[in-house]
Image: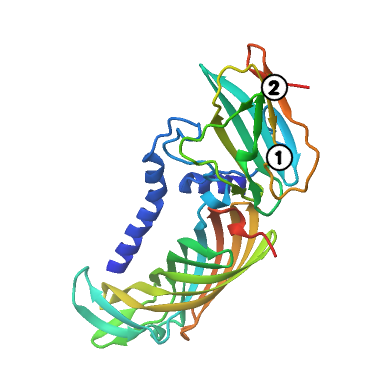
Amino acid sequence: MKGLAFAMASTAFLLASPARASKSCVETSDVVGEQRCSRYGDGWSSERSLPLTLEFGLVRTTFGLGGRDFSAKFGKNGPEAYRFDGGTFASEARTYGFSLRATGFLSPFVYLGFEQSFGFGHTEGGSFQAGQYAVSTASGLNTVAAVFGVPFGLRLPLGKLSLRGEVFGGLTILGLTQEANAARASATWVGGAVETRGYLDLWLANDTTFSVMVGQDLLGRNDRRLGLVLTYHGRAYDGRYGF
Amino acid sequence: MRTAILAFCLLTGCGYRAYRPDVRPFPGGQRTLGCLDVGVLPERRGDRLFLDVRVGNTCSKPQAFSIQALRVVDGEGHAVSLLDPRGELQLVHVDPETEGRAVVALDRPTPTRLCVDVRDVALDAPAAVVTPLCFEDRGLGFVVTP
């Protein structure tokens, strides 16, 4: 769960940064050459705008559980009590949550960024035996998921629409709570994530897009992702409207 | 959707900067040069004189804009220069469907009549006959004169 804590802390940092930046300088003049916080062309010229984006998404993720080796323990810092394959009790777990990410455009067609997402869900499953523990999931499992990593993508500008394809590489943390011998246990799986994703973007304004995203993992775990994403763009149309 | 955008912008600190000429026309005089709408208005603040320059790109591609190509003359035909103490007034490209603004100090505070020729500022615009914009200070600020 340390990964979860790290991811949440970095989310708080991401959210706090713009507010902190806006308070760091107080403008005293609007006259060119006398401004303290900005320069001529800031915010409206290609030369003085940053090709960065900030995204907020609502994401539904389905994690295939088979082949994922969970480690379970009792209490926060207890030793490992038992291990089990996630496919023992259910084939998949679905979570609903949000994603945050920042990207930078290396050109109007290529971008690189950092992303983190969190999901929460409830999975129904059967009971099973893990070593000396009778694990019950009959009342369902609370599922927590955190994914963070680096997206690298290509963008095809088509006027008011854009198509994007990207590869995402990072880390997935899956947490499950369950009952073992009538005591509450938490099980965690941590592993790599490699996904391919597609986006369809609609420009709502020159600096704002609304996107539909679909993703599929490339590691054979049958993870699937569907999202709705709102994005603020630091450079109008990411520098290119069409061909 | 506007509410969602507003909430997102409040969260991220972004500014909505799309150029909407039909919603917010520029104050003062204005000329259209290809994709660029260029507006100017002299403004007196105390004993200093400024030129409020606005530019809006109506197209979906960046447009070259050279503010140094503005030609300002007083009522007697003498050139008035834009003050640029930090050398910022370089050629820039106005982002698509975006509005920009610059307030520039003028080197002479006394003129009560000014004419501003904007015809050379839009480098991507086709050549066209553009008449200068003239203003006169009648005590309540500068107003456009024919």
The image shows residue A129, relative to residue B130, as above or below, that is below
Can residue A167 be seen from the camera position used here?
A: yes
- For the residue pair B111 and B27, the one nearer the viewer reads as B111
- Binning the other alpha carbons within 10 Å of mark 1 as few (below 14), some (14 to 19) or many (20 upward) gives many
User: Could you tell me which quadrant the C terminus of chain A lies in?
Assistant: bottom right
Residue A160: percent from the left, percent from the top? 69, 58
Residue A215: percent from the left, percent from the top? 54, 74
The image shows residue A237, relative to residue A141, as above or below, that is above
Residue A47: percent from the left, percent from the top? 54, 51
Residue depicted at x 71% and y 38%: B21
Labels 2 and 1: the sequence-earlier one: 1
Q: Quadrant of residue B32?
A: top right
Q: Which residue is mark 2?
A: B135
Q: Nearer the viewer, mark 2 or mark 1?
A: 2
For badge 1, the amino acid type reads: Asp
Residue A117: percent from the left, percent from the top? 43, 65
Residue depicted at x 74% and y 48%: B125
Q: Which residue is mark 1?
A: B37
